[in-house]
Image (spheres, rainbow, N blue to C red):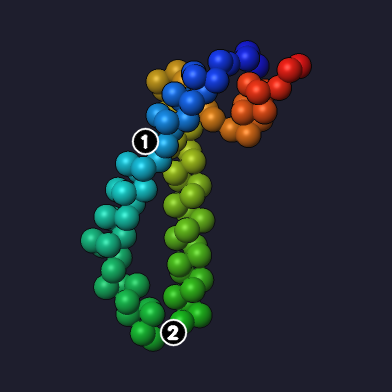
Amino acid sequence: MKKLEPHVLIRNLMIEIIIYSILIFGYYLIVLRWLDDWLMSIFQSNLVVYAVTGLGLIVIQAALLDFVTSFLMRYIKLDQFGIRRLLDVFSDR
């Protein structure tokens, strides 16, 4: 793994945050548009099923978001931000 300069790391982080923001906003609109009535009916009928459904949607969204963001970061040939990358940049090794 090559060592990056802090300004390059911050630039890559900002690009990744922008990609995450766009994808999360799109997911939010999809849930509001197509799942709102269904989720409201589950909420009114059974809270346990609603809670499990909500957690399932969160897990699916997180996995899909990570996959799409990783793919886009590789496609535009930028190193993905991560704690190991951050520690590597600011360490004296």
Secondary structure of residue under mark 1:
helix
Relative side of 28 to 64, left or right: left
Q: Which mark is residue 18?
A: 1
- Res 2 → quadrant: top right
Marks 1 and 2, how far apart at CA: 36 Å
| Amino acid at dot 1 | Ile
- Res 85 → quadrant: top right
Above or below residue 93? Residue 46 is below
| Amino acid at dot 2 | Asn
- Res 4 → quadrant: top right
Q: Pointers 1 and 2 in contact (CB under 8 A)?
A: no
Residue 27 seen in this snapshot: yes
Nearest-to-viewer mark from 1 and 2: 1
Above or below residue 70? Residue 50 is below
**Residue position marked by numbered label 2 in the rendering:** 46
Above or below residue 71? Residue 27 is below
Give the percent coordinates (x, y) of residue 67: 48, 38
In the orientation shown, which residue stands out farthest toward the right?
93
Q: Residue at x 27, y 55 (%)?
A: 29
Residue 74 seen in this snapshot: no
43 or 85: nearer the eye?
85
Give the percent coordinates (x, y) of residue 84: 66, 30
How crowded pointer 2 is (Cα within 10 Å; few <14, some 14-19, many 20+) is rated as: few
Relative side of 1 to 23, left or right: right
Q: Residue at x 59, y 33 (%)?
A: 82
Q: Residue at x 42, y 37 (%)?
A: 17
Give the percent coordinates (x, y) of residue 6: 55, 20
